[in-house]
């Protein structure tokens, strides 16, 4: 039975590390802010879950389980919120290609919040101007 649990823990560890690697590669290679943000958040949460499950199976200590659950819940709550805040900030500073958006829910919200409608806050760029390139 111990060999089976060790094997499952090894598989979880390899798959979890692969998910984290995929997130890192996506951060480097994807072309724009929204796709990079997606790559940073989605596989990272699942990869961390698999790594924590691997630790739980390898250690076989039930006293460690509440700490691992707390770690995963903290990441589950903070990673999507952080990604959401990065996306909103990127939208406001025009790092998002608005022509590529299917639905632009933030356009009205940003205008209602008092953002300069003529693009005065970002050096005179208009909505028709392409977003700036990667820094």
Image (tube, rainbow, N blue to C red):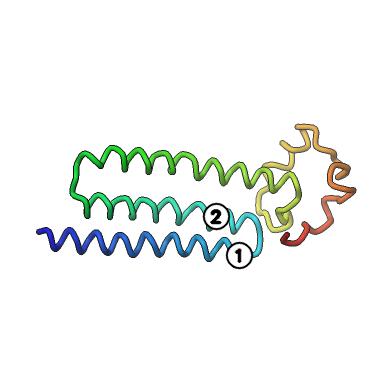
Secondary-structure class at tag 1: loop
Q: Residue at x 65, y 64 (%)?
A: 31
Look at the numbered discs 2 and 1 and tell me whether their residues touch, using CB distance below 8 Å.
Answer: yes
- Above or below: residue 62 compared with residue 39: above
- Which residue is painted at 85% across and 42% down in the image? 121
Task: Report crowding for label 1: few under 14, some 14 to 19, many 20 or more residues within 10 A (C-alpha).
Answer: some
Q: CA distance from mark 2 to mark 1?
A: 10 Å
Image coordinates of residue 61 in percent, x first then y, are 19, 45
Which numbered circle lies on residue 30?
A: 1
| Residue 92 placement: quadrant | top right
For the residue carrying disc 2, how many other residues have a C-alpha within 10 Å: few (<14), some (14-19), or many (20+)?
A: some
Residue 133 location, quadrant: bottom right
Q: Which circle's residue, 2 or 1, is located before the other in the chain?
A: 1
Q: Taking 110 as reference, is 47 left or right?
A: left
Helix, strand or loop under label 2: helix
Q: Which residue is mark 2?
A: 38
């Amino acid at each position: 039975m111990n060999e089976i649990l060790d094997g499952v823990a090894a598989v979880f560890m390899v798959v979890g590390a692969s998910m984290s690697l995929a997130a890192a590669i996506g951060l480097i290679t994807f072309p724009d802010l929204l796709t990079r943000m997606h790559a940073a958040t989605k596989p990272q949460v699942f990869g961390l879950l698999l790594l924590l499950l691997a630790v739980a199976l390898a250690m076989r200590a039930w006293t460690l389980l509440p700490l691992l659950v707390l770690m995963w819940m903290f990441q589950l709550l903070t990673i999507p919120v952080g990604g959401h805040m990065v996306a909103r900030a990127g939208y406001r500073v025009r790092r998002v290609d608005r022509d590529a958006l299917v639905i632009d829910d933030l356009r009205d919200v940003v205008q209602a919040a008092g953002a300069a409608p003529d693009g005065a806050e970002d050096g005179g760029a208009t909505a028709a101007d392409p977003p700036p390139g990667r820094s």
